[in-house]
Amino acid sequence: MSRSVERALSILNLFDCQKTEWGITEISRELDLSKSTVHGLVKSLEKQDFLQMADNGKYGLGIKVYELGRTYSGNIRLNSAAEPMIKWLSKKYQESVHLAIYAGNKAVFIINNQAGSEGSAFPKAGAEVFAYCTAVGKVLLAFQPEEDIEKYLINESLIPLTPNTIINSELLRTELEQVKQHRFAIDREEALPGIACVAAPIFSVSRQIIAAISVSGNSAKMLDEQVLSWCCRDVVQAAQTISELMGYMG
């Protein structure tokens, strides 16, 4: 961690319920930093809305901190709502079940309940995977605003990770349209050889996609016609149940 970042975080850590406002001189004295250094850091934090100046000239926490807190709180609520469905799917299919969100044009795992013989093949919570070649990624991408999808299709490099990876932007566009229509996506060994996945979208009370839930496992099992049909139905049902717990009314 760079010295500037560490010092900026130290400033944010000063704020608590007992002391909600700090002046430049107070921060300088508390952290044993020069006033000029503190002033530069505070102005950078203010510019990014992590701090805001009060009428008395001191600084309090800004709107960005509140927004991050809401995001964290929302993830905690989402995890709680999803837990029973994750356990249900994992027990029924004896395969790994994931919960992912969309960030930086990638799917980011926030829960990875590993099960089945292929469990070790999947990234852990916090890991990022490409959106265009994974079931969770395609679901998350399909429900983004149209202009964001267009930017993705124009700017993203579609690297062939397996012989089944979709690397043509027009074919990917068609795939995303089908995902949006049917409300589930299938990864047919597009990211990892021998691994298949089924995913469905989770929506918020505002009808925006907030996450995707998926079941991943051995492709010979997952792509069996009957198993695939059952799994698509169950993953969609699980996603719908979680969405309703999050306040969604579709």
Image: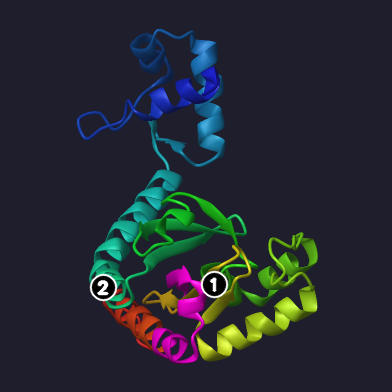
The residue type indicated by label 2 comes to Lys
Asked where in the image residue 97 lies, by quadrant, the reply is bottom left
Q: Does residue 55 belong to the magenta stretch?
A: no
Q: Earlier in the sequence, mark 1 or mark 2?
A: 2
Q: Does residue 211 belong to the magenta stretch?
A: yes
In this orientation, which residue lies closer to the viewer: 154 or 109?
A: 109
Residue shown at the point (41%, 75%) measured from the top left: 202
Residue 180 lies, with reference to residue 87, above or below; the image says below
Residue shown at the point (78%, 73%) measured from the top left: 169
Asked where in the image residue 180 lies, by quadrant, the reply is bottom right
Can see residue 95?
yes
User: What is the x, y in percent for residue 187?
Assistant: 57, 74
In this orientation, which residue lies closer to the viewer: 198 or 31?
A: 198
Residue at label 2? Answer: 91
User: What is the x, y in percent for residue 207?
Assistant: 44, 79
Look at the image and give the residue range highlighted in magenta: 208-232
Mark 2 is surrounded, within 10 Å at the Cα level, by few (under 14), some (14 to 19) or many (20 or more) other residues, namely: some
